[in-house]
Amino acid sequence: MISSHCRRCASTSASNPAAWARNTLPGGFTSDGLKHYGLLTNFGQESLEQLKSQEVRRRKRQLDDDTNQPYVDLFSKRISDECTDYLKSQASPSDTLARAFFGSKHFMPERMILTPVHLLSGESSTSIPTSFQVKDRFLQWTVVCKSPLELILSWQVSNVKGVTMLAFDPALRKAYHGNCINITEKALDRPLAATGLQLHKQYAQFLLDGMVKHLPSTKTNM
């Protein structure tokens, strides 16, 4: 599960790439894991460590409620051996992924729209961080969970909130981009919502492609 990766790796030293390689299990990046993390943490708005055990049990019961499941997706892309080796050599591959994601040409239009808004508010950084740390804010996103192989960021616009996940699996040589949003799957069955959902999926895949292309090695294996 995604959240277990964060807990297992959060205290790993970022100064020694070999350290995270010894203590991190690759794989386990699933849409169910991301959905569970979203539901248990109120889509990144609350910390699991701060919740009372009774509340955690209540939220776990929600996981079995098939009528009220939030929308979740998870896209992956195979990357080249050269790119894999580069990411494995980094002290924090998740930082490299985030810089590539937010610095890519594919994300640039969205960044250009959001930057003036956050420059005026002064509540978030508009410069891409070198290192993403928990509670750091960049444009619309706040880092809520970090390990060497993955980064989870929360966001909220009015009553809509969600989490965005970026991850790297060195064993499978894959990069991941996932989203979980507090809109139920049932609500997305309506025709207009279904059209919007298809556009979202295309855009999410487009952003993943942009992230991979922006990594130091641009050669990918489909």
Image (cartoon, helix red, strand yellow):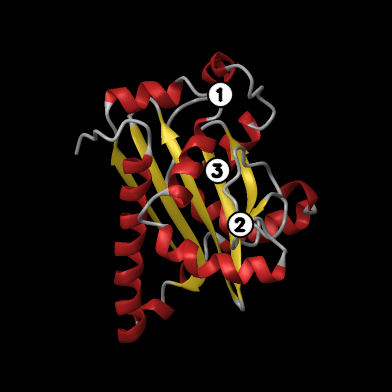
Q: Is residue 169 left or right of residue 144?
A: left
Name the residue tied to disc 3.
Answer: 151
Mark 3 and mark 1 lie on one chain; the one further toward the N terminus is 1
* Point 54% across, 15% down: residue: 22
Mark 2 and mark 3 lie on one chain; the one further toward the N terminus is 2
* 194 is higher (above) or lower (below) than 216: below
* Point 61% across, 71% down: residue: 117
* 35 is higher (above) or lower (below) than 199: above
Q: CA distance from mark 3 to mark 1?
A: 14 Å
**Element carrying mark 3:** strand
Bin the neighbour count of mark 1 within 10 Å (Cα to Cα): few under 14, some 14-19, many 20 and up: many
Bin the neighbour count of mark 3 within 10 Å (Cα to Cα): few under 14, some 14-19, many 20 and up: many
Name the residue tied to disc 1.
Answer: 91
Evaluate whether residue 87 shows in this view.
yes
Amino acid of disc 2: Thr
Q: Is residue 189 left or right of residue 117?
A: left
Q: CA distance from mark 2 to mark 1?
A: 24 Å
Q: Position of residue 107 (x, y in %)?
A: 41, 57
Name the residue tied to disc 2.
Answer: 126
* Point 50% across, 44% down: residue: 98
Q: Position of residue 126 (x, y in %)?
A: 61, 57
Amino acid of disc 3: Leu
| Nearer the observer, 103 or 197 | 103
Q: Position of residue 45 (x, y in %)?
A: 68, 60
Q: Are marks 3 and 1 in contact (CB under 8 Å)?
A: no
Amino acid of disc 1: Ala
* 202 is higher (above) or lower (below) than 197: above
Q: Is residue 165 left or right of residue 49?
A: left
Q: CA distance from mark 2 to mark 3?
A: 18 Å
* Point 36% across, 26% down: residue: 84
| Nearer the observer, 212 or 195 | 212
| Nearer the observer, 171 or 132 | 132
